[in-house]
Amino acid sequence: MLKPALDELRATLDRFEAQLPLVDEAGREIIRSLRHGGKVLSCGNGGSAADALHLAEEFVGRYRGERKSLPAICLAADVTALTCIGNDYGFDDVFSRQVEGLGRKGDVLVAFTTSGNSPNIIKALEAGKAAGLYTVLLAGKDGGRAKGLGDLDIIIPANDSARIQEVHTFILHSWLEMVEAEKW
């Protein structure tokens, strides 16, 4: 059971490797935003919400090295906002309303989704573009309906959500390492 999963992850990483320049480009955009007073907004559903939270908390706290706290907000973390917006507008709007209220031109929005088909992720990316945020889609499979909505799309070439999320974790850790290599 473990060996086939490990082999599948290795094969996914091999297929993904050609996208490393996109990961680097997004990381540089995150650094640029943070250097110029911007912040990182992140969102996702389920396990992807955990990835979004992981990214944000490491910026505000720290990853490995000692540095100043950096501004990041996970839009899936505030249960009062989620339930208020979900109740008043519907679940499809839980992230886009927060992007409208919290996002500013020059910020970065990172949207995590394994399928690319979550309506609330699609609407968040659209709201981010409308507000002048740099939008990054981290998806899997074929990118779903969200494909093409990010300023930069990184689509993991796999169909298994576990493998997709494992590569998403590699990407977010890579960004954290890039950020922490900077002098803050």
Image (tube, rainbow, N blue to C red):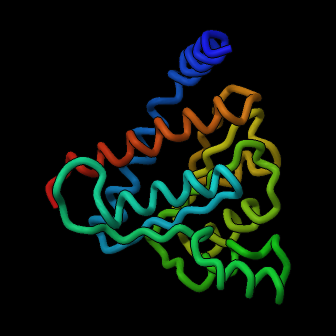
- Where is residue 97? Give x, y as percent: 69, 81
On the picture, is 173 further left or further right than 118?
Answer: left
On the picture, is 47 further left or further right than 103?
Answer: right
Q: Nearer the viewer, residue 4 or 18?
A: 4
Instruction: Answer with the quarter of the image where residue 15 lies.
Output: top right
Task: Decide: is 157 above or below 74.
Answer: above
Task: Decide: is 53 above or below 142.
Answer: below
All told, the count of numbered labels is 0
On the picture, is 69 further left or further right than 13?
Answer: left
On the picture, is 143 further left or further right than 164?
Answer: right
Q: Nearer the viewer, residue 85 or 79?
A: 79
- Where is residue 37? Give x, y as percent: 31, 74
Residue drawn 58% across the image and 55% down it: 50
The quadrant of the rendering that contains the C terminus is: bottom left
- Where is residue 112? Give x, y as percent: 63, 51
Residue drawn 44% across the image and 32% down it: 21
Instruction: Answer with the quarter of the image where residue 58 lies.
Output: bottom left
Residue drawn 45% across the image and 65% down it: 40
Task: Decide: is 44 above or below 177.
Answer: below
Instruction: Answer with the quarter of the image where residue 10 lies.
Output: top right
Name, please, the residue furthest toward the front: 1
The quadrant of the rendering that contains the N terminus is: top right
- Where is residue 90? Give x, y as percent: 85, 78
